[in-house]
Amino acid sequence: MLNKMRHIFFIFIIFLSSLWSQEKDPLPLYESILEMQVASYRLSRDKLYEIYFPDFELIQPDMGQAITISEQTIGNILESIEGTGMEEQFGAVEDIWNNMRLGMLNPLSEKEFVKFYYDCKTMDQLLSVMADTLEERLVKTHPDIRDIRLKYEIRKAVYLTNIGYITAHYPLSQSLKGILRESVGKAKAYLNEIRRRKAGTAGASVPMLAQVLNDWNFYYFNLHNVLFSPEKTLFSMANTLNLHIYLMFNPAKTTAYR
């Protein structure tokens, strides 16, 4: 009888082990959540430019790309989130995204943009809570988790800096005028952290770090440029920084890009 119970117990342990081995790695879900944050602020930037620069030829193609990335990312999240216990949390994110979809159909008024931006900010906060939860699970299996998050946090700060410049220089809403200072401070802090983390390392990411720092210096210079209106330059440079930061953390793709 005792041997039979031991045999059953042994089979049960094997069964549990097989379930644990089949558990999905939460890293793809984690990165999809962070990518959604970046894409939503990029989209918010595009909708803001649509108000003040409706004839700027880069807006519509960029907005289309931002929407495509957002939709694909939501699809990735929906495929990965089942069984994580965060399904209800993401349901709230989907509700906000569906509201934002309505704002993508036509150009927004200044008042409508303020609501659109705060929807984006609320969604960002909900996604951050989900990312924090996953990060606690990932920290043991992915010791480079902070590097992974930095890749997204700094890209988000770049787009927020672009939004911050426009909202600080056009009479849109007093409540949005603090975005620029906060975002520039965060971007600088993230760049300093990346510089520290990559100090003394080697590899393809090092030249890309130099490129990103040069990009940032030009971007930052134009934030204070009084010789000409830099709005379109900032738009292009935000996209360039977004790409180069991505390549810095994914150096294997640098050759294909070039």
Image (cartoon, helix red, strand yellow):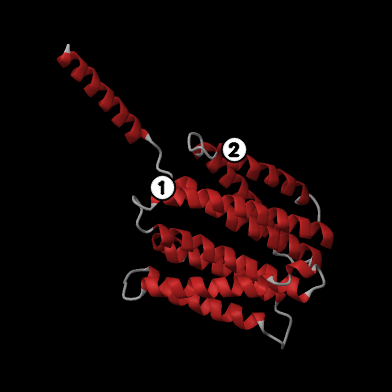
User: Tag 1's secondary structure?
Assistant: helix
User: Tag 2's secondary structure?
Assistant: helix
Query: Left or right: 138 with respect to 161?
Result: left
Residue shown at the point (19%, 18%) measured from the top left: 7
Residue shown at the point (77%, 51%) measured from the top left: 103
**Residue lying farthest bottom?**
227
Tag 1: amino acid = Arg
Task: Specify which label sits upstream in the sequence, 1 or 2.
Answer: 2
Residue shown at the point (69%, 63%) measured from the top left: 45
Q: Which mark is residue 88?
A: 2
Give the image location of residue 124, x and y in percent. 62, 54
Query: Left or right: 241 with respect to 168?
Result: left
Tag 2: amino acid = Glu
Q: If the image is split into quadrants, where does the N terminus sit?
A: top left
Residue corresponding to mark 1: 137
**Residue lying farthest left?**
3
